[in-house]
Image (tube, rainbow, N blue to C red):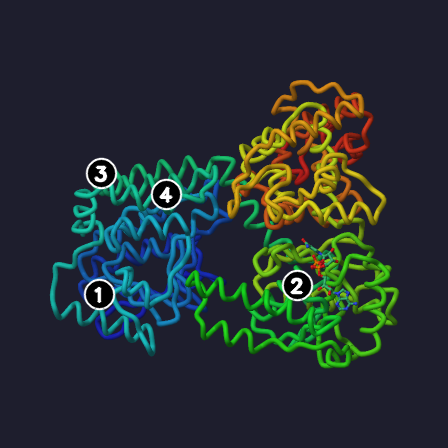
Amino acid sequence: MSGYVEVSRAGDVAVVTLDNPPVNALSLHLREPLHQALEALRDDETASAIVITCAGRTFVSGADITEFGTPKQLQRPSLPDLCALLETISKPTVAAIHGTALGGGLELALACHYRVADKAAKVGLPEVKLGLLPGSGGTVRLPRLVGPEKAVAMIVSGAPIGAAQALKAGVVDDVAEGDLVAAAVAFAQAKVRTGGPHVPVRDRNDKIEAARADLASFDAAVKEATRKSRGLEAPLACAEAVRNAITLDFDAALKKERELFLKLVAGDQSRAQRHLFFAEREAAKVPGIGKDVAPRQVARVGVIGAGTMGGGIAMSFVNGGLPVTVLEMSEEALDRGFATIEKNYAISVARGSLSEEVKQERMARFSRTTDYADLADCDLIVEAVFEEMDVKKQVFGKLDKVAKPGAILASNTSYLDVDEIASSTGRPQDVLGLHFFSPANVMRLLEIVRGKKTAPDVLVTALGVARKIGKVPVVVGVCHGFVGNRMLGARSAESEDLLLEGATPQQVDKVFTDFGWPMGPFQMGDLAGLDIGWRNRKSLGKTAVIADALCEAGRFGQKTGKGFYLYEEGSRTPVPDAEVERLIEEKARERGTNRRNVSDEEITERTLYPMINEGARVLEEKIAARPSDIDIVWTNGYGFPIGKGGPMFWAELEGLRKIVERLEYWHGKTGKDVFKPAPLLKRLAEAGSGFTSKSAS
Ligand code: NAD
């Protein structure tokens, strides 16, 4: 047949094998021959049953997302056509699932009468992560198998489940221990022997009827499932589609599902989320470094410093399966660090996300020391000591003496010059920055800072290790603050000035949360601790009028119950504070600033536009290789709303011309450098193009 679809026989059972490497995506060139094969088999009396299976490492892992938004996706036979065809077949149809059946892959399987899964298989409908809903019957068929409440939880979270759970929930009918295809064929033959009718999933209504009798309970499940959807349309649309499966008949619900899907796929949010999906994959590629560069082996990791970051970094490696030696200045510091690590794991155990047994396994992977000689067998050593160049240089000087040849030496510095740190060793080619984000065991972003002399295989190794421990790596160049903190700096001073000119912390923060950020800059400062920035500024001889004054008054944020806001004992809810208002007024008076009404629009323009401007400078200086890398940094490290695709993607939606115009306006008014349009931004705006040069502004 086509090469993408092969039909063979196992006795009187037809076995249809899909073969579209690497993940058997449902591209048009696969759908066409599959439709033909199924039609032929439906009418072929010599075939008593049909098993659909896949070649390679997995069942169908989804639709072909490169077809999204293109005519090919809708070209027939579409996936809904295939599913409809399957349901006209009266002989038993069985999907044999190995690897992952995700998205369109699971939808195809749901249109079969039965599903047999390999014991290591996973199934799920992750479309929501691309800003979509399962648009080929997933929202209408899955509730018929597992019940609408379970279905809405699965579809809104997008999280896949394993074979055992899928069997329990009713997504699959059997789990195979040995040869999957043989098991699926045997399953099909057993069904043939028992005789029909074989009821297609579309006609299984008992769970739907039960839910119809208790819609309130379903609506409560929706509320729980969509609680964290924060301004995203897709989770709500997913829930609406599953609700339709209860309140409408199958065909009407299916039609509605398609409408909702088409609306989402054409919308900006899904475009943004799909952009991020590809951006994450793209970020793993470093221009100029080919596939031929082999990584170094990393079997043991050292971490220097067991403070806020060191502890979290050590946990990240241990969680990824690597043994870690933690070095501190004293036994007391080690005790403190390990007490925090232990406490963090204990919280996970209490929450039920980790078993006591796994906690013990992880704790056993740590070693502790105060002696640098104990780092001699480490393949990668990450330094997370105080943010002072002299201290860092001393540490790297010592490492140079004890680390084995070829060991990778990394700094977690937030701002400092990685090349200068590297120069304190005799092996700058082995040095780079690994900038984790706080809390390091949770945050996925990892800025990999490439020094002038960092060797290609060191970068390749760092990228591999990052993925192994579940991080999202982005390679960046050396400059003050790299990509993320440098762009953050461009907005920080402005947030303070807005207060002095008349805005309130709550107004600024609301503009941020309305935009989709989890919190605004002042809530963020209170959460992180205002004293951190204060100390940092003092060491650099810098000031921030209001934050400094708050710190001088002992208001460090949540940890002291007061910062830009008040916090009730044990609460994290920020309450506006008249005292802060008075302090802002006083500081404004001292500076001779007349406070006025500041509009929300002004807040957006003066905080977000300078970030984009700085992003353009970062690109021009080649600190980031691509605009999409910046988007990955901001969505994974700083809470930029994923439905807006990151600052550079959003800038294109906003319009580069408008941004430049408004930057020029604010530059004229304030004379501040942050508003001076970057040459690249100006050029692109004048040319009417975007950062990705795909869309005009
Ligand atoms: P911290 O003060 O919580 O921890 C620093 C630890 O290093 C302390 O436990 C200290 O005892 C130890 N230490 C200091 N000098 C040492 C030495 N010579 N040998 C061994 N141990 C030593 O600081 P932190 O917040 O964890 O920051 C550490 C680094 O991570 C800094 O470079 C910081 O800029 C960077 N960073 C911090 C954050 C953050 O949000 N806190 C985020 C990213 C990066």
The residue pinned by badge 1 equals 49
- Residue 19 sits above or below residue 482 on the image: below
Residue beneath the point at 43% across and 47% down: 128
Using the image, tell me which numbered label, if any, was put on residue 463.
2
The quarter of the picture where the C terminus appears is top right
Looking at the rendered structure, the kind of residue marked 4 is: Cys
Mark 1: few/some/many CA within 10 Å (<14, 14-19, 20+): many
Residue 238's tag is 4
Report if residue 1 is visible in the image: no
Q: Earlier in the sequence, mark 3 or mark 2?
A: 3
Write down the quadrant of residue 240 in the picture.
Answer: top left
Which of the marked residues, 1 or 4, is nearer the chain's N terminus? 1
Judged left or right of residue 400, residue 375 is left
Q: Does the closest atom of ligand 1 sit within 8 Å of the Cβ of label 3? A: no
What residue type is disc 3 on? Leu
Q: Looking at the image, is mark 1 or mark 2 earlier in the sequence?
A: 1
Which of discs 1 and 3 lies nearer the camera? The answer is 3
The N terminus, quarter of image:
bottom left
Q: Earlier in the sequence, mark 4 or mark 2?
A: 4
> Mark 1: which amino acid?
Ala
Residue 83 sits above or below residue 586 on the image:
below
